[in-house]
């Protein structure tokens, strides 16, 4: 099969039932199909949906003709072909499309011109507006054994063969130049020249990151560290923080027990408070070290955002632990 556009929207199947959505998204966020809203959730690669009506349903239990559809999908995947598919449902995570007897999922992060800051009701409304539309899509992941079919509108904008070329030229440990294409709660997608990689939110900084938009914007051009490459799944895991040294590796050389340091309170919990003394270095002020005397809760002493001066009680770089005290 060549890379021509294929149209599979002429006879859309019925919307999926509740069991399908339970298999599709399994951690409880808002979902909706043409039949009405339900409570579901979607996360990234590992939690992407299956294409069956029930979780764990075998491929052979699909309606008649599904084997031929899976072959067609696989051929499209292997030849980098695009397909025009009709949107038949949505949830907070993205869109559900029909490929004959199969169901495919298009994550919101893989949509073109989807509002980067959309969340809550605005996000659902933006996705709901796509129902009934036909999108030009490219298969980016399929697994018949798991009834899994993931598609991308963004990938369909790239010339056929580009992704395979990029995959063949990069490897773990490389530093590549890329451009931010989308920001999501779980991380940032970066275009590496025809193939998108993901920087998980935990790989953006050695310090805390509330949301990727706190440090990056769509369109930003930057260097990224390649953590891993999976050619079979066309996945590239990237990191921004690994371009810089891990501050914990040298913490015992740069700080001493008894030293007075300045920090900012980042979190207050029942057993104390955490303070950041530099990017990526947070120490615990145990409740017993917050103040002299008695108090009901650590929040009676400090709050998030407070600037404090603390004394270092102990340092353990290997365990990534730093003990601080506000007591004199």
Image: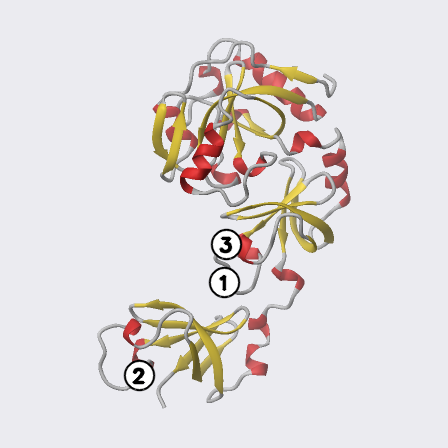
Residue at image position (55%, 72%) is 248
Q: In which image quadrant can residue 249 be found?
A: bottom right
Q: Is residue 251 visible?
A: yes
Which numbered disc flags the more N-terminal residue, 2 or 1?
A: 1
Color style of the picture: secondary structure
| Residue on which the image places disc 1 | 208
In the picture, which quadrant includes the N terminus?
A: top right
- Label 2 and label 1: CA atoms lie apart by 25 Å
Is disc 2 in contact with disc 1, using a CB cutoff of under 8 Å? Answer: no
Name the residue at 38% across, 77% down: 285
Image depth: mark 1 or mark 3 in front: 3
Instruction: Name the residue at 35% across, 24% down.
Output: 36
Q: Position of residue 304 (x, y in %)?
A: 39, 69
Q: Is residue 39 left or right of residue 133?
A: left
On-image quarter of the C terminus: bottom left
Disc 3 target residue: 211
Earlier-in-chain disc, 3 versus 2: 3
Question: For the residue labelled by badge 2, is the local secondary structure a helix, a strand or a loop?
Answer: loop
x, y percent for residue 27:
38, 40
Which mark, by number, is residue 190? none
- Residue on which disc 2 sits: 291
Residue 178 image offset from top left, x and y in percent: 71, 49
Whether residue 92 is visible: no
Within-10-Å neighbours for mark 1: few <14, some 14–19, many 20+: some
Question: Whole-Å distance between the Cαs marked 1 and 3?
Answer: 9 Å
Q: Are marks 3 and 2 in contact (CB under 8 Å)?
A: no
Residue 205, horizontal then vertical, whole percent: 57, 61
Element carrying mark 1: loop
Q: Between label 3 and label 2, give the one nearer the viewer.
A: 3
Is residue 320 placed above or below 91 in the rendered structure?
A: below
25 to 181, vertically: above or below: above
């Amino acid at each position: 099969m060549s890379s021509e556009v294929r149209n599979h929207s002429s006879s859309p199947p019925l919307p999926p039932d509740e069991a399908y959505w339970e298999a599709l998204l399994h951690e409880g966020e808002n979902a909706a199909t043409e039949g009405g809203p339900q409570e579901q959730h979607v996360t990234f690669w590992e939690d992407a949906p299956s294409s069956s009506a029930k979780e764990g349903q075998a491929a052979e239990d699909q309606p008649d003709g599904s084997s031929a559809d899976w072959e067609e999908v696989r051929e499209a995947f292997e030849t980098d072909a695009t397909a025009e598919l009709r949107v038949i449902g949505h949830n907070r995570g993205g869109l559900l499309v029909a490929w004959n007897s199969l169901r495919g999922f298009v994550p919101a992060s893989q949509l073109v011109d989807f509002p980067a800051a959309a969340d809550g009701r605005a996000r659902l409304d933006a996705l709901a507006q796509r129902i009934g539309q036909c999108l030009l899509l490219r298969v980016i992941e399929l697994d018949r054994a798991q009834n899994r079919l993931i598609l991308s509108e963004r990938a369909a904008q790239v010339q056929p063969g580009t992704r395979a070329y990029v995959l063949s030229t990069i490897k773990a440990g490389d530093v590549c130049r890329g451009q931010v294409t989308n920001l999501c709660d779980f991380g940032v997608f970066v275009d590496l020249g025809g193939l998108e990689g993901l920087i998980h939110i935990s790989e953006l900084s050695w310090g805390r990151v509330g949301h990727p938009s706190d440090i990056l914007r769509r369109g930003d051009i930057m260097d990224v560290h390649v953590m891993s490459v999976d050619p079979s799944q066309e996945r590239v895991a990237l990191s921004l923080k690994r371009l810089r040294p891990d501050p914990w590796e040298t913490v015992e050389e740069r700080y001493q027990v008894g030293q007075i340091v300045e920090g900012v309170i980042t979190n207050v919990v029942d057993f104390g408070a955490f303070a950041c003394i530099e990017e990526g270095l947070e120490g615990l002020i145990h409740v017993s070290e917050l103040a002299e005397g008695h108090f009901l809760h650590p929040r009676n002493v400090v709050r998030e955002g407070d600037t404090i001066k603390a004394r270092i009680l102990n340092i353990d770089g290997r365990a990534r632990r730093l003990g601080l005290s506000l007591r004199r």
